[in-house]
Amino acid sequence: MANHNTTLKSKKTILSLEELHLNNENRNRINQLIEEFTYIDALNNLNIPVDNKILLHGHTGCGKTATAHAIGLALNKKVITLNLGGFVSSRLGETAKNLSEIFKTASNEKAILFIDEFDFIGKLRDYDTTDSGEIKRLVNALIQQIDHLSDTSLLICATNHLDIIDTALLRRFQIKLEYQLPSKKALDIYYDGILSSFPEGINQIVRTYNISFAEAKDLAFQQIKAHIIQYEKQRKHLLFSYGALKSKEVQLDNFGRELKGTEDLLSGYKLTDEEIKDTSVIKIHKTEILSIATKSREENDHIKGLVFEILGEELMQIDRFGLSNYKRVKETTASGAEVWIYVAQNSY
């Protein structure tokens, strides 16, 4: 089948229906759907069909995709996700054939076929370069596939633009659920749930309303990440320095302040000198010869150095000094201090 890899995709984090923020009307209708499939044999015995074609429409980021996967979880059905915008081939005849194969797979596996960007076919009608006859044939092919879908499978489609979908397609859906922007109360509950996972101080944010749950999550995490980064910048670390960083000149040039250090020893290492040819590194370290700590096989080997207390942002600055053959590791000095130290890449 001539599909692009980005067309069919899986969703890693799946929420249950109980975890979704659904309004009462949508929740009740979905509960009815779940019960119909739970007792499908009893309904079939009386020749009563189940409703297995659902259209989710409304504002983006309000839980349409999450609902499709939650229904799959509740019914223990595989969810085959098809992004229609990325699926429609420039050769529309091939697209119709591929649609047939996907619907066949969903029916054979009694799976849920979730079609996202369902309005894409409606958008295609407005393209001046698109042959209207081909579009009509594609719509007819989709209608045929929907009509012949096995009643043991489900078709769930999602759109943010209900108004541009062909009315003949809309008539095929027995269930249409609208997703609206959450209320202030619903968003506060959602914010509280997100923030409860983080320690006090990090979880203080400015709350925004009249937005979707997805937008609220993005805004909350942006602020939380900013708090974490600021905390890490100001967090204090101990650094064992045995080289150029012991120089007052290097400290002032790079940190704008003089570091105060205490002498210490680090066992199990030895120093080797290495010539530096990169002028940008020479400018930072004020030397063309740098010492590098390497793991030693001799028990009595040790190196002398100074232990500095530095801020997290200063530690990150040292990481960017351009020494590709160095790496930063945690070690314990002779005095028992847990320190960061830059050692040769091949030391471990």
Image: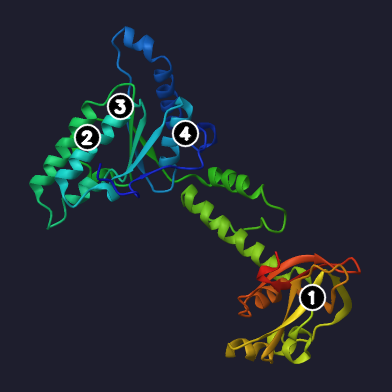
Badge 3 amino acid: Ser
Foreground: 168 or 317?
317
Q: Quick check: marks 2 and 3 in contact, CB under 8 Å?
A: no
**Colouring:** rainbow
- Between disc 2 and disc 3, whose residue precedes? 2
Q: Quick check: marks 2 and 4 in contact, CB under 8 Å?
A: no
The span from disc 2 to disc 3 (Cα, nearest Å) is 11 Å
Which residue shows up at 91% across the image and 69% down it? 335
- Please tell me whether mark 3 sits on a helix, a strand or a loop: helix
- Between disc 4 and disc 1, whose residue precedes? 4
Badge 4 amino acid: Ala
The span from disc 1 to disc 3 (Cα, nearest Å) is 67 Å
Give coordinates of residue 192: x percent, y percent: 62, 46
Foreground: 7 or 61?
7
The span from disc 3 to disc 4 (Cα, nearest Å) is 19 Å
Badge 2 amino acid: Ser
- Please tell me whether mark 1 sits on a helix, a strand or a loop: strand
| Res 26 → quadrant | top left
- Residue holding disc 1: 270
- Residue holding disc 3: 107
- Please tell me whether mark 4 sits on a helix, a strand or a loop: helix
The reply to whether residue 284 is visible in this rendering is: yes
- Between disc 1 and disc 3, whose residue precedes? 3
Instruction: From this view, report whether residue 314 is shown above or below residue 206.
Output: below
Quarter of the image for the C terminus: give it: bottom right
Q: Is residue 171 left or right of residue 34?
A: left
Q: Residue furthest front?
A: 298
- Between disc 2 and disc 4, whose residue precedes? 4
